[in-house]
Amino acid sequence: MRSSVALVVALACTVVAWAPAARPARRPLPLSRLRVPAQLPGLNDEAVLQSAQYYEEACIEEEACELPGDDSFTVAILGDLHLDPRKMEDYYSGRDHIVPVLQDAKSRGVQCALVSLGDLGESKSVRPDETDELFAGTTACHKLAADFLGSFDDTPYEVLWGNHDLEGIDEFATDELNLEMALRVHNKPTPQFCREVAEKTLLVGLSSTVFRDAKYTSHEVTVDDVQLAWFEDLLEKHSAEDGWKLFVFSHAPPIGSGLRVLQENHVINGCCWLNHSGGKSTRKFIELVRKHRCVKAWFSGHFHLGQDYQDSITFPSIPKEQGPYPNRGSCVFAQTSVMRSGTSRDKRQQSRLLRGNAHGFEICTVNHAAGGTIRLDATITYKDFGHEVGTFAHDHDDKLHDNFIKVYSPVEGDGNEVLPDPESGKLDASRGKAVTPSTIAWWRLSCGRVLGIYDSRMLEYDPSTLAPLGLVVAADELLGRRVLVLPSGEERDCKVEASAAVGMEGADCAEAEGEEQAVLLVNLGDGKDAAAMHADFEVTVVQPNEDGSYWRKIVRNKITRMKEKRRMETAAEYAVQVAQQEFIAAEPSVVSSWGPYHQISGTAKNTGLAVPKKKVATVAK
């Protein structure tokens, strides 16, 4: 079944063609409203609000107006819907906010489209009194989504799959069968899409096609190899030099986008980025963006965070005083929020609007919690085929909630990098002190891997983009301990140099072994007296994974965890029964025995697996 689906995907390289729209009798636009003076990225004091009748109100004097060009387009972008048939009010009102915008654009001959970024249904039972079946990924879910997405004034819609869209595990035995149903219901030939929305302007979408077969967490957004090859071929054939402009859509963003992520959820569970655990394929997306300047913007959802943070939109370049060049090609990355209140992490209910033409494009927010007000967020003006100027249209609120503070990522020259002693090779990562909640530090291993300490955790970061990859050591194991890196073997071929190409620091050594090193957690006790220190003295070695990475793939896919839960429940029932029969007063304890998987939770919380002290001597021998 997998091969047949892959074959269909491989053959689907046809672009949905653009054709000029029928023009109205009236001529609405004197000049492109997107033609703005070149400005450096900055912040303005007040938000710019727009009307749903954007194009109509631009025409002040009819006789002085002219038509939008064939290069004009408007796209409405919906984030994670998580539709629940019991709670449709927010969706209907959200649709009512967007439809007038599309009607206004179409009435002026502007090409329009609607894009859904996936996670279409609620990942829980919507009939709890009747069944425990999850709604997401079921036939009923996709039919509800198709009806909803098809109700925006006959605007053609494109949809892609997120990490919940193949979750119909009670209805379908395989991901392939689930995918075939979803494609059929939405009348889509392939998981990916390509639509020419205006002259030489493509909307391109990539989908997650793995759920049951996920090697680690099922909430990783995985674009399969066939789609990735198709995407690369598409970029090669539609170059910026030939005038092509591509706007890309995926459920999760690619690593290197610079968008705000949630450390408490997506970082520690390894599901922030496209193909998060994929190694080379994780970095492939940003490498393609860097190579192909036809990619002008990339929209994603997944995090359920609002669009009021500055890093909900990131530009290809940043002012020098804010840090080094991020090397994002010509691409603007944009996070998209949610429509329904019950699915938001920060009480924001927002969608995106994308308006563009030959001169550039605007990114706007539709605020569903405020009656559908439309706010201009950013204006991007093309200087030439490979260079742009981006301007923020308003100030940003980065203090909405403590849980959503910007996750720290290392930056060259930020003062937190720890270097090894040039003579001994020893690297004192915690600078001679025990780790506390305020400790911030990062360092490069000789193999090219990057580790760091932040928010009471040790994390691994991508060596090229310095974006967070995942949890290495949790607070239960790290707090109160020193962190040392010591040479532990022979020197290999690759060692990180002080200088590297901009945006690719450490990338050349990412797959090399380098000089072998041991990462140690050293517990010297509380230090109050020598006897206590000697009694508590303990050294823990942080071993890398088999592939050389350090971040822990603790959370397995949902099918595996459901089976584990059933086994645990069976064991618990047996333990209670025996305790009652044998008159055992103590409450029975049930634990899992396999490796680090001592929890059945979908969230990684602890990493501590300390060896019992009575075995330490044996291990040492």
Image: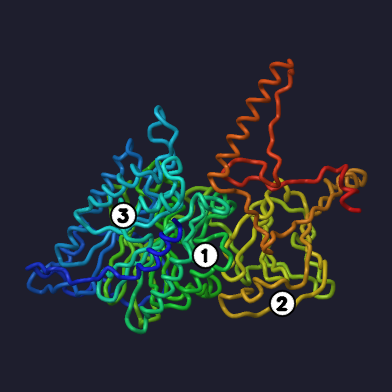
Check disc 1 and give the amino acid type: Ile
**Can you tell which of label 1 and label 2 is closer to the viewer?**
2
Horizontal arrangement in the rendering, residue 447 relative to residue 126 (left or right): right
| Element marked by disc 3 | strand
Residue 494 x %, y %? 71, 77
Marks 3/1: CA distance? Answer: 26 Å
N-terminal of the two: label 2 or label 3?
A: 3
Q: Determine the secondary structure under disc 1.
A: loop
Q: Nearer the viewer, residue 412 or 302?
A: 302
Q: Tell me the distance, in whole angstroms, between the alpha carbons under discs 2 and 3.
A: 50 Å
Where the N terminus falls, by quadrant?
Answer: bottom left
Distance between the alpha carbons at the discs numbered 1 and 2: 24 Å
Callout 1 touching callout 2 (CB < 8 Å):
no
Q: Position of residue 261 (x, y in %)?
A: 51, 56
**Front-most of residues 552 and 534:** 552
Crowding around mark 1 (Cα neighbors within 10 Å: few <14, some 14 to 19, many 20+) is many
Q: Which residue is depicted at the point 89% across and 53% down?
A: 620
Q: Which residue is mark 1?
A: 255
What residue is pinned by disc 3? Answer: 366
Percent across and percent down for residue 273 are 51, 60
**For discs 2 and 3, the disc positioned in front in the rendered view:** 2
> Which residue is depicted at the point 78% across and 69% down?
516
Mark 2, Cα crowd under 10 Å, few <14 / some 14-19 / many 20+, is: some
Q: Residue at x 61, y 47 (%)?
A: 604
Q: On residue 194, which mark appears?
A: none
Q: Quadrant of residue 292?
A: bottom left
Horizontal side of 390 relative to 254 (left or right) equals: left
- Amino acid type, callout 2: Cys
Q: Is residue 88 above or below residue 287?
A: above
Relative to 576, does residue 314 appear above or below in the rendering? below
